Image (cartoon, rainbow, N blue to C red):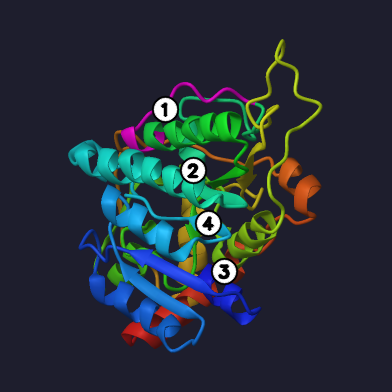
Amino acid sequence: MHCAERLLSRGDTVVGIDSLNAYYDPALKEARLARLSSHPNFSFERLDVADRAGMAALFARVRPTRVLHLAAQAGVRYSIDQPDDYSDSNLLGFGNVLQGCRAAQVQHLVYASSSSVYGGNAKLPYSERDAVDHPVSYYAATKKANEVMAHSYAHLYGMPTTGLRFFTVYGPWGRPDMALFKFTRAMLAGEPIDVYGNGQLVRDFTYIDDIVEGVLRVLDKPATPDPAYDPLAPNPGISTAPYRIFNIGNSTPTVLMDYIAALEAALGTTADKRMLPIQPGDMHSTAADVSALAAWVGFKPATPVGEGVARFARWYRDFYGS
């Protein structure tokens, strides 16, 4: 929604695709859609990216110049319980997007990968130059698969593709299954919050406005082959094909307890914390090296966590009532 708003505001024509499924509250999805629907340059297709025939027909009809693919079955923990949903949306669906882009001769495909691809890596901050062969969740495995699927199309068909590894995105209109949303709801209701990893998990929380700025700058600069690529010492973030991978993160790793403290300050209340062990599939720490992104598009995220959390808290109270 945020990316679509920015694209529309600068004069682009946007066709939005969403299945509006019930993974989380469809009313929130409908409310986001309502913000876009009044714009004359916006149209909406209720469609599942896993629908091969439907996606092929849409690409043939619309023939987009560029594609921003942010659709996926999200969530690390849910992938343990419902892996088939991830196979359908993140593998079959991504394949349908690649095929559509190839058929329509799209100028640039930009798609959401995830910091979760770094999995069992222990060296921080994470760099696109690092190998990502040890995912610790099926969700992460599907995102790694997207990157290598995209490379094959970039190599075979010369189709520019860029994957963006998002680091714990948060902010207004976000997903209710994310920690900030759950914490806010529980704290305002006077209920305890579940704090995993005994509050010592570390995340590179990245505010939505920074994500959108990075996404649009990348979308406007199609991937190109990198003459520095050395097949004898391969860098996974670049290629002889028009293919790029970038981290988008705040580069300010924050301990979960400090994130909660920022929310307590924003809401003016103290959370009743229920300390729990780390969950299966969770990573202990994330931190982004964004030097490659900064070199490519001249931008890196910088919104402080305290400021971003306060903006979310204000939006939550406005949208749901205090």
Mark 4 vs 1: CB contact within 8 A: no
Marks 2 and 3 sit apart, C-alpha to C-alpha, by 20 Å
Residue at the spot 37% in from the left edge and 57% down from the top edge: 179
Quarter placement of the C terminus: bottom left
Helix, strand or loop at label 1? It is loop
Q: Principal SS element in the magenta part?
A: loop
The magenta stretch is: 130-140
Residue at the spot 68% in from the left edge and 40% down from the top edge: 289
4 or 1: tag closer to the N-terminus:
4
Q: Amino acid at mark 1?
A: Pro
Residue at the spot 67% in from the left edge and 27% down from the top edge: 129
Helix, strand or loop at label 4? It is strand
Which of the 4 image quarters holds residue 320? Answer: bottom left
Which numbered disc covers residue 135? 1
1 or 2: tag closer to the N-terminus:
2
Q: Residues within 10 Å of mark 2 (few under 14, many from 20)?
A: many
| Residue 286 rendering spot, x and y as whole percentages | 54, 40
User: Which residue is tagged 2?
Assistant: 114
Marks 1 and 2 sit apart, C-alpha to C-alpha, by 11 Å
Residues 131 and 48: in front is 48
Q: Amino acid at mark 3?
A: Gly
Which numbered disc covers residue 308? 3
Q: Amino acid at mark 2?
A: Ser
The mark lying in front, picked from 4 and 2, is 4
Was residue 252 drawn as part of the magenta stretch in this picture? no
Marks 4 and 1 sit apart, C-alpha to C-alpha, by 27 Å
Q: Residues within 10 Å of mark 4 (few under 14, many from 20)?
A: many
User: Which residue is tagged 4?
Assistant: 67
Was residue 133 drawn as part of the magenta stretch in this picture? yes
The mark lying in front, picked from 4 and 1, is 4
Marks 3 and 4 sit apart, C-alpha to C-alpha, by 28 Å
Marks 1 and 3 sit apart, C-alpha to C-alpha, by 29 Å
